[in-house]
Amino acid sequence: MTASSDSRGNVIGLCSTGHGAAIALASARHGVRALTLDRFTGHKHSLLFTRRERDEIRRGATPIDRQINEALSYSYDGFPRAHVIEETFLPFLHAVLRGLPLTPRDIDLVVTSDCHFGFNSGRVGGLLRSFFPNAEVVRSLEHHAIHQWQAFLPSPFAAAAVLTADESGEALDRLGGRKVAMTLAVARGTAMEVVHEHTHPRSSPGLLYADVSRHLGYHAGEEGKTMGLAAFGGDCVYRALAPHLTLHRDGSFDFMDTPELLARLARWSPRRERRDPVLPVHADIAHGVQRLLEDIMGNAMRALEAATPPDIEAVCLAGGVALNSCANERIFRASRFKDIYVCPNAGDDGHALACALYGARMLRGLAMPRGMAHDYLGPARGDDALRAEVAARGLEVIEATPDAVAALLAEGRIVGLYQGGAEFGPRALGNRSILADPRPAGMAVQVNARVKHRELYRPYAPVVLEEKVHEWFEMRGRSPYMLRVVPVRPDRRARVPAITHIDGTARVQTIGRADNPRLYDIVAAFERRTGIPVIMNTSFNLAGKPVVETLDDALDCYRVTGIDALVIGPCLLVKPEEERAHAPPSPAAMAAEMTELREYEVLCDHARALEPAA
């Protein structure tokens, strides 16, 4: 069998790190697609190894294997779910390519990194070549080099300052075995000039945040819980720790090492078990590390400004730390830059997209459009296909007009929204979303109790019409990927309490009609009905589960939760009244819910007591 005529200009990007795995396609003819492994498997934090690699790490065959085993087990409170590349990879790849006239033989370039599990040359050997017989395989990119291109290539800018930050990349021979944790660079066209790079553990903002998050009882991938909790805390821990932080003009920093930090934090009541209550002191600890992170990243931004030519007025961010939307906004507001781009999948899962775009643009010179127009990169089902799938299941539906959906929302109904390709990043942006009315103060608690079952101190986000954002939120520019936290205008907070955090902020998604016509029209219809161009938007999933990927995933979540209606492309499925009345929770569940509510009220009282007197 020979390669088809599509075998030139099809690039696959791969990644598989301790945070997860993903595949991306960048094709001159077929555009860009990307999917994370956890969406494909239905298991959060799914990792991908070769069989040999998994077995050697599990049994600690070498000192390095023991270190990896201990690090993964510590990060996830036990060894995470591991999938074997020999069994999982080809079905995963076919899911990404679904509906395209492409086979693995049509791929002419594969780009990954030798630091990635499952794809490194040391243990894989010729495995990738057996999957892609006609492809050149490139594994030469360093971890933070990928983050740099991940920040810049999907952006709309021809030139930009680039800031990357995480816990660390791989050990580098060129640095005597040290690991890069932060880079400051300037990008123009196809050139990336690194002006400063700082190493782990001395200048690792991700390590500091992870250490404190673990002290609070959270594991890898749960740092967002620390960020949400920080809004309820005061400055006492920050004031105690800040004198130990030394910031340098090149953007690096010095701080106490992990053992000393944990010894100092021990005086402030660690959470040893996940079932332990979250206390005001834990909010103070979260607030302290959030402030420290903002100091560190703000200093790095100032160093980057100093190294960036004045004609460059935009900045791009990537790396796991760039998912901290509170820090993103504060350092941007304090900078001279006029525009910002934060990669929607800014962490290690986003490496696959960066590798694919780097291969397409830099190694193959393909005519790819500059900038990603959206983050809906999962393999898509069009409206006609979704209508056929609904009919094949015998579901009784009505037309999902914007007015019909807006009417349900205005009545207090919780609505799932499933359409097109899934978002590649961790934020739901309208293709795998749960929507609700932002006006009732208790709506967040209701969504939590009926669907999400997550911590009450974690806020829900708004989606707002792009042309109305400045009337409701204090921000400049756009925020299409929900990665900026900004103040809700004081005179508007009482009208949208369900999306206003305890500190008066919200993690905003702006929506223009070109971004997502169906979601835009629903928000616009809601505004016509209520006078408010804002809707609550959260991810379509249960706590501890990845965001739904397939229609069956969405229907399963809809059926077992208190979601009242489900938009499936052009179709609207509404639960009968009798199905909305769920059986009352057990006495034990009610007691647990009341305990959690009391803890939340204590946190709120603590936060309000910290507010300055009017």
Image (cartoon, rainbow, N blue to C red):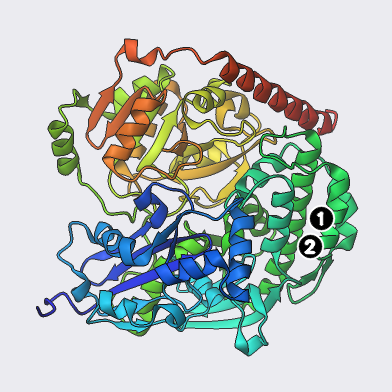
Q: Is residue 3 above or below residue 222?
A: below
Q: How many marks?
A: 2
Picture coordinates of residue 92, whole percent (x, y): 30, 59
Identity of the residue drawn at 33% across and 36% down: 554
The x, y position of residue 521, in whole percent, is 32, 35
Can you identify the residue that label 2 sits on?
A: 258
Disc number placed over residue 116 in the picture, else none: none
Under circle 1, the secondary element is: helix
* Residue in the foreground of this view, choosing between 502 and 60: 60
> On the image, numbered disc 1 is attached to which residue?
262
Residue in the picture at 32% in, 54% down: 378
Compared to residue 463, the image places residue 87 above or below, namely: below
Q: Amino acid at mark 1?
A: Leu
Q: Quadrant of the N terminus?
A: bottom left
State which quadrant residue 431 falls in. Answer: top left
Indicate the amino acid at tag 2.
Thr
* Local SS, label 2: helix
Residue 530, x across and y down, in percent:
44, 21
Residue nearer the viewer, 95 or 357: 95
